[in-house]
Image: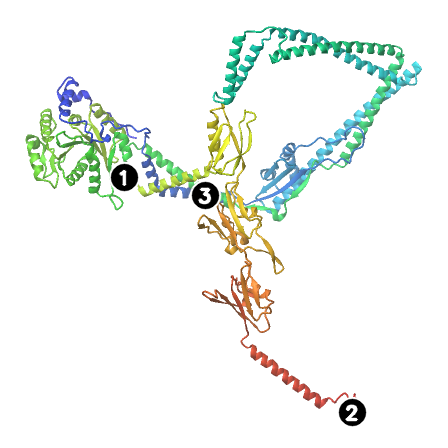
Amino acid sequence: MNAVPPTSFSLTAINRKRGISSPVAPRQREATALIEPMDLSNSAMPAAASAEPAAPSIKLPFDPLRVIDAIIRRWWLMLLSGLIFSAALLAVGWLRFETLYTVKSQIIKQQLASAFRQSDSGESFKPTDLTIPTLMSLMYSGATIAATGIQLEHRYEESALRSGLIVAAERNTDIVNISMTSNVSADAVLEMLKAYTETVLQLSRELQRSDASNMKAFLQKQIERTDVDLLKVNEELLAYGRQSHLLDADKQMDAWLAELGNFTLKYETLKLDHDTLDVRILGVERELGKVDTNAARVDTARKELADLRVRYTDEHPAVVESMEKLHSMEQQMKSSGMRTDAPPKPGESNVAESLYLDLVRLRSEKQVMGEQLTKLLAVREGINERLALLPRQAMEYAHIKSRKQTLETSRALLAGRQREAALYEENSQGYFRLFSMSRAQDVSAVKPTQKLIMAGAGGFGGGALLVAAIVVILTLLDGYIRSSGDLKRATGLPVLGALPLKLDSTTENEDSWAFRTWTRLQPMLQTHTNGGAMICGVLHAAEDNAASRLIGLLADAAIRRGLACITITRELTEDALTLTAAVDQPERPGKITREITNRPYRIGMDEEWQWTPSQRQQWQAALAHWRTLPGVVILIELPAVEQPEALLIAEQLPNLIWAGSSGTCLVQKVQDALRMYRDAGCRLIAAVLDRAPTLRPAALARFGALALLLSSFSSAWAQTALPLGPGDAVNINMPGFEGLERKEVPVGPDGKLTYMQARDIQVSGLSLDQLREKLVTELRRYYRNARVVVTPSTFQSRKVYVLGKVVKKGAINLDRPLTILEVVAEAGGLETGLFQQNTVELADLGRSFVMRGQTRLPVNLEALFLHGDMKQNAHVEPGDYLYFPSANSNEIYVLGNVKMQGTQGLLAHTSVHSAIAQAGGFTPKAYTRRVLVVRGSFEKPERFVVDMEDVLTARAKGFRLEPKDILFVADKPWARAEELLHMAINAFLQGAVSGWTRANIGPYIQQPILPQLR
């Protein structure tokens, strides 16, 4: 961006040109001289004409429409870049992407066998459990991959095995899924999966066998140690028996010792409780003396009120009742005074009564415990006396024998565990077994087509976005004024109009543009109170020459509005008056404007005019005369804003506008220049742009329509929740407040719902989230920090209706989004029945339909149910109506040379050959090459000829019949000739045989069989 040069003048320089020393008093005098004859409070002047336009609430540092237009103008570059990037990524993907083959297997955790139990006591041995996470960790280990490679004889690299391996545990089951993917071939990946699965199962068996072997060795050491201890105990028992001459221990000693221990424990426990009661009795007596019944009641009421206020607000009925109760108790306590006497009267204080009852109970317990201690002490002394009579040797002998029994039991248990571990080691089944394995036909092949499409789309999008980003950056770095938005941002003024650089059929011409711009400018101009001239100065930059052109256009527009116009510009044309002559004779322009009404009167600045102090005084005098001209518009082209003379002239003018061309001035430079004019009190009212680039309105409109469409889609996507309606029910709960959970709260027929203090909430048409927000808003009036949880219970308000040949006719609740297939499934499916000894569906799918309101949906149910065309499986909406008419009402008529003529029922798949087959087939005289079908016999009959020989030889498709069709099979054309020929041949053969027989063969019967009758 080019650097902005500093402003070339200041107020001090301007004051020097004025020839004054103080900038305050002269400016006030000049401003007063200008403002006095003018009415600045003209109510007809719009707000836009204020000297300082109101700053917008959001001010962007760039023109967004210009950025969008720059992107749209370079669509071809974005397309080209996208195609190049897409082609590059497609080429890389074509070289890198390959067809991937995937196979899967499953292994399942098996329960350990219980048939290995070898002991009756204790639990049987079971190897340490191998968890699924541990197994998955071992399956990914390098040792398992290496073992699989060895099993495959290193035909495939270990990296190929590892990269294509996926192991995942199925949730809430004992199944582990194994997936193997490779780009070699289908047979290779299946071989790798089988080898890997077998390696994993072998690893499972080895782990179980190793665990059993380690446990077996450990148990053997334990058995050896137990045998040594048992041998020592036997020797000790034998030696003690010989030494003490004892053959058996006295078992009664063990019983008495156990009984003594039990009584001793009871005595000590009871004594401790007895001592504790003394302390508790003293504490209760002390508290009972301090209890004040009224104070306790008030304190309890205050605590209850505090607890309620934590949960509820002061408007809650429970809080209001508790406050009234507390106030009443406080008044009662003040009137009755404090009570310190004990015991309390019945019903006076719950706390005092409770303490007194506790005191009585504790004293009673102390007395009972004392009696029990006396009895226990007597029993214990008696047991001690009996034990003293037993010999000491018998006790020692019993102790040694008990140790022997313990060791023998332990040894038997260890031996049983050892035998179980040995059986597990010999017959290891493993922790897991094979559950399923893919076959060769189950191998799924994924071609790189999808990846190539994604790569191409990503490359196209990336290339297009890269160009768009570069265009946006370059547009933002361009500091020149190029659009109306840039001009408004630079000047801070409303832009009256932007004259396009290129005028075509899509833009208005210069005259129309000038007329519209002047129409907007005229109400903003301040005029003399007595109807004087409208004076407007035009500011511009030094490098810009748009002011003269725009002044000419605006002057012509003012002429068309019926106003006289004087233009003062830097250009001196042949028909223009010089500014020197005009200020010398200020009455001359007024006379000429009254004579010339079809064009503006032009005044040009000649070379003699240099805006010297004397010339400025002449200018002020002439301007004061011209200001009084009625019905005249004076448009003045000021010097460039960088020159001090421009500010000196602008201070004398009531209206100023900025005129600039697109691409000639920097935004920052214009802002700095106009800031000086505003500081000087100049009235800037508007700005005009010349040679503005034509923003493509159609493209911008399409862009806005696309953005609106996307926003509507996003809002429709966000609104996926089912709305509530009459008949629905929800579950409502308030966490943190016990007892407020309500199940199946219904929505009434009027669409209203009631929960706790939230009464008659209108919920019809609301989603669950919206209902929760409404309840929270209502309940927070009564509960502090109320949080509401709403869950659906039943949806009964949204229904779709299914009638006709379905199993369950009626209304089906739409408690979730349903398709046509799902609705028919909810209705139990289509009805079936017996037709010609076959089970068929009784619905005529060709005439079935779906109605939505008054519109019949374009859905082909026959293609959906019979051909599986899932494109016809549309989603249903509440109020939809599905009808499946009966197929039994349709019939066809089969006539002619068939074995069984008559009427047949029409099914969806009935054709000519199936109807003839149902009629028993053709007769011998049937003409099969020309079967006639007559359709629409009552209205507009149509004829169709079907060649059955072509159909039966698969040279033509079968002809499908429709309801009320007539099928006629004619006779063969030569059927009568064939009949006569057959009769002639039969007669000739009969005569020939008879004659030949008479001539060559005599009669076999020579004598009469029956006697002759005379």
Front residue (pair 742, 467): 742
Q: Which residue is mark 3?
A: 456
Q: Do residues under tags 2 and 3 come within 8 Å of each other at their CB atoms?
A: no
Query: What residue do we see at 74% from left, 12% from top?
Result: 269
Circle 1: residue type: Pro
The answer to whether residue 568 is seen in the rendering is no
The residue lying at 48 percent from left, 21 percent from top is 313
Residue at image coords 14%, 39%: 562
Element under disc 1: loop
Type of residue at label 2? Leu
Residue 573, picture quadrant: top left
N-terminal-most mark, 1 or 2:
1
Q: Is residue 903 above or below residue 639?
A: below
Label of residue 1013 in the image: 2
Residue depth check, mark 3 versus mark 1: number of the one nearer the observer: 1
- Classify the position of the C terminus by image quarter: bottom right
Residue closer to the observer: 528 or 446: 528
Between circles 1 and 2, the one closer to the viewer is 2
Question: Label 2 neighbourhood size at 10 Å, few (<14), some (14-19), many (20+)?
Answer: few
Which residue matches tag 1? Answer: 693
Give the quadrant of residue 630.
Answer: top left
